[in-house]
Amino acid sequence: MYLAQREAWGRYGTTVVASTILRATTNVSTGKTVLASYIIEQVCNVAEFDVGWFYCRFGNNDKSTLLAILKGVIAQLVRANGQLYPHVLQAKNTTGDLKLSSHKVGKDLLAECLQVLEKTCIIIDGLDECDKDVRGEIISLFARLVKERNDAVPGSLRMLFVSTDEADIRKQLSKAVCLTLKSTDNFSEMQDYARTWAKRIQDLHTLTDQKTEEIFHEVMRRADGKPSALVHISLKQPKLTSLGMYFYCYAIFSTLGVQLTLEDVYRELQPDCLPRGFGDV
């Protein structure tokens, strides 16, 4: 795991399992999903908690709706605790909703599951990737569930939302504990990752240290949305702001790593070849 994520967990871990509702915010390119994945992994190692989680994805109806989140979280909780199987089967038999296509059934079933479990932690990554009206409904539902469960049994339900810092999310979760991951928190880790890849390119094409550094710095600048050195890009061209730094570095270096000649490497680093978003990659 990345050092930055280990350090972030060291700072946030106790808060995640102790706070009723926690909001973790990041910039677009700071590896929020990597952080969320590491937190999920670590919370799953806390024996007293059953953990449910979900990764939202913009533009994907299977990954950005309330029903999708309900289905995903319930599925994770059922896998974590076999006590829930009879309740899920009973809901299917009673409602006839074999694929859980109803919001009401999903809400009722999740509430029932939470009543069965002694301690639960739910983590939703990428809340900002849902439409504004949808994420408002998501926050309202889970905030209500958290309140109801903890009013009945204090400490029984914990909730973590990971997202960019959007005004509507900030307003709805104004009473939640807020933690912020800055780009500087994992930039040194990004450099180590990029240097490892650059060394592979160097060994493959017998590059000088200077040429290797040029490639390293250019990819890092592009990942940070600031191209300048090895290629000359017009200031009118859009900066790379919608593509995560980790994914961008992986995409570029893996492409460079399969080039047969040094000329091919430099061609891939030209402005018309460098991707500017997920669609290009």
Image (spheres, rainbow, N blue to C red):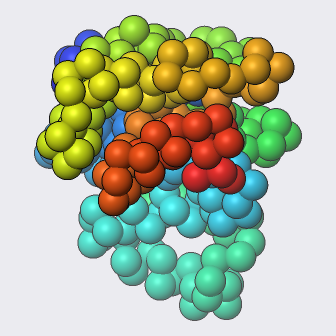
Q: Quadrant of residue 165?
A: top right
Q: Point out residue 221 in the picture as x, y percentages from the top left corner.
A: 49, 19
Tell me the quadrant of the picture where the N terminus can be found: top left
- Is 123 situated left or right of 42 in this image? right
Q: Point out residue 246 in the picture as x, y percentages from the top left corner.
A: 41, 36
Image: 246 above or below 168: below
- Residue 161 seen from this side: no
Q: Residue at x 68, y 23 (%)?
A: 233
Image: 63 above or below 128: below
Q: Name the residue nearer the viewer: 168 or 143.
A: 168
Q: Name the residue nearer the viewer: 252 or 34.
A: 252
Image: 250 above or below 116: above
Question: How many numbered callouts?
Answer: 0
Q: Point out residue 160 in the picture as x, y percentages from the top left corner.
A: 47, 32
Q: Residue at x 62, y 83 (%)?
A: 99
Q: Residue at x 51, y 38 (%)?
A: 269
- Residue 235 seen from this side: yes
- Is 97 situated left or right of 16 in this image? right
Q: Quadrant of residue 176?
A: top right
Q: Name the residue nearer the viewer: 175 or 128.
A: 128
Q: Residue at x 50, y 27 (%)?
A: 223
Q: Point out residue 199 in the picture as x, y percentages from the top left corner.
A: 19, 35
